[in-house]
Image (cartoon, rainbow, N blue to C red):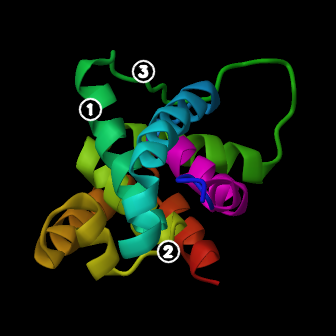
Amino acid sequence: MNRHEGFREFVLARQQALMRTAYLLIGDAHLAEDLLQSVLAKVARHWPKLSREGNPEAYTRKALVNQYISWTRRARPEVASASPPETGVSYDEAVLDRVMLRRALAELTRKQRAVIVLRFWADLTEAQTADALGCSIGNVKSQTHHALARLRALAPGLVEARLEEVAR
């Protein structure tokens, strides 16, 4: 029996969701690909045990968050701007909203951003988010509260509209 049996199927089935999480955490498509690739390499090393005993998706999400936090500790900070760059192309309102929300997310602390991504985009429960971050449920609630307050200050009205859209 191949020690990586099932790993390929796991990656094919969950790659888009994991890539979306990586992108929302790091904010750059190329870096998100690098982040996911490095995490999947680690998951592959532990695959036999994960596939037997654990929840590989939860482990992979936790590894994504940990790797993201590790990378951003030593990486240069993202530079946010109050307005999108002028390109001569007209944007519809939904595109501008997404750009502004991504920029507002970039202003959060690493843990706040991770909590928002896991809770509202990955649709994890508070307990699952706490497990993924290795913290208490109370910490998740506190980080969520502070992150939403910060997002509301950075992008008034936009946050509520997006959170309602995600909740549907």
Is residue 103 shown left or right of residue 63?
right
What's the amino acid at mark 2?
Asp
- Mark 2 lies on residue: 123
Residue under the image location 61 percent in, 47 percent down: 19
Give the percent coordinates (x, y) of residue 168.
65, 84
- Mark 1 lies on residue: 70
Give the spatial CA distance, label 1 vs label 3.
19 Å
- Mark 3 lies on residue: 79
Residues 8 and 35: in front is 8
Residues 21 and 47: in front is 47
Badge nearest the viewer, 1 or 2: 1
Query: Which residues are the magenta region?
Result: 6-25
Give the percent coordinates (x, y) of residue 84.
63, 28
Sooner in the amino-acid sequence: mark 1 or mark 3: 1
Give the percent coordinates (x, y) of residue 31.
54, 27
What's the amino acid at mark 3?
Val
Is residue 22 shown left or right of residue 119?
right
The magenta stretch spans residue 13? yes
Sooner in the amino-acid sequence: mark 3 or mark 2: 3
